Image (cartoon, rainbow, N blue to C red):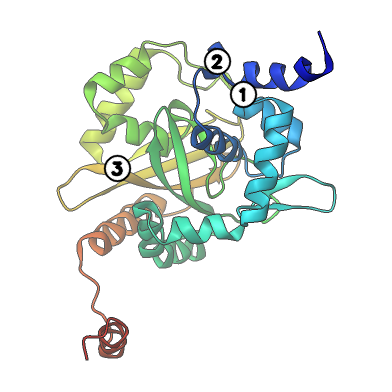
Amino acid sequence: MNETSSVDIQSVRSRLQDTGPGSAKRTAAARVLSLLDAFAQRGEPLTLTEIARRADLSLTTTHRLAHEVLDWGGLEMDEEGRYRLSRKILKLASASTEDLRIRELALPHLVDLQRRTGLTVNLSVREGDEVMYLEALRAHPNYTGQNRMGGRLPLHVTATGQLLLAFADPSFQEDYLSRPLKRYTEFTPSRPEEIRERMAAARRDGFLRIDGALAPGAGSMAAPVPDALGAVDVAVGAIYARVHPEPHGLKDLLLATARRIARARVERPVLDPRTIAFNRSHAGLV
């Protein structure tokens, strides 16, 4: 083989890896999205190797794409050379997503619930097979678990997750319950019939409580937050330590908070006249 027809073996391997059985025929855009999606699993900074593994990309491709996104402003690099999502991504998300709009509507009510109870409180939605936290106000700021904004957990191990599962489509429920369910403690519900009973009680009573499912010393309670048509796609929850008696009136406070958030979802916001005037002027209508 002469010099003009030599092949960069590493380059070929990289291209084959990025178009192999696990990631066949991915476009350039799909690879970038895979790279960004690597950060959805956990909110911590990642090395190039960690990004490559989670995105199923070669290290060479990951390096190139990461620096392109870094130059665009979508990633930041810390002092240890690890990558994290930038504020630009959050800015783009906050400008368009319904979930963040709900979070903004709910936040004053979550703050009030946290102040009244002194507990960790959260607002959650279902994202596929997991519960995802839109917001979490914690009693202890050094908490590092998944109960944080953007954190995810399997549906069956939290009160908000089981509640959202209870109001999901029946076919989805049966599909979820047909799989092996991971147990985190001896109290984690894993038998389909047990979870079905819990879901039926949640639909009947309008709230759900579960103790020790994720950690033996913790319990949680959740209430549904329906939309304007009555569909339950959001839940509000509170987490408490089982060694102490359940905070007095927690259930009533949680239900009241859920009702206030549901009301805020259906009420049309009243814009300040100055805002209307600014918008009209900015659009060239005056």
Q: Earlier in the sequence, mark 1 or mark 3?
A: 1
Question: Disc 3 residue type?
Answer: Asp
Taking the image as shown, residue 196 lies to the left or right of residue 161, namely: left
Total marks in image: 3
Element marked by disc 1: loop
Q: How far from the left and from the top, in percent, is residue 237?
A: 43, 47
SS under mark 2 = helix
**Looking at the image, residue 111 lies above or below residue 20:** below
Q: Residues within 10 Å of mark 2 (few under 14, many from 20)?
A: few
- Read off the residue under disc 1: 56
Picture disc at residue 22:
2
Q: Is residue 86 above or below residue 231?
A: below
The kind of residue tagged 2 is Gly
Residue 179 picture quarter: top left
Cα distance, mark 2 to mark 3?
A: 32 Å
Q: Left or right: where does residue 168 sit relative to residue 128?
A: left
Disc 1 residue crowd, few under 14, some 14–19, many 20+, Cα 10 Å: many
What residue is disc 3 on?
Answer: 233
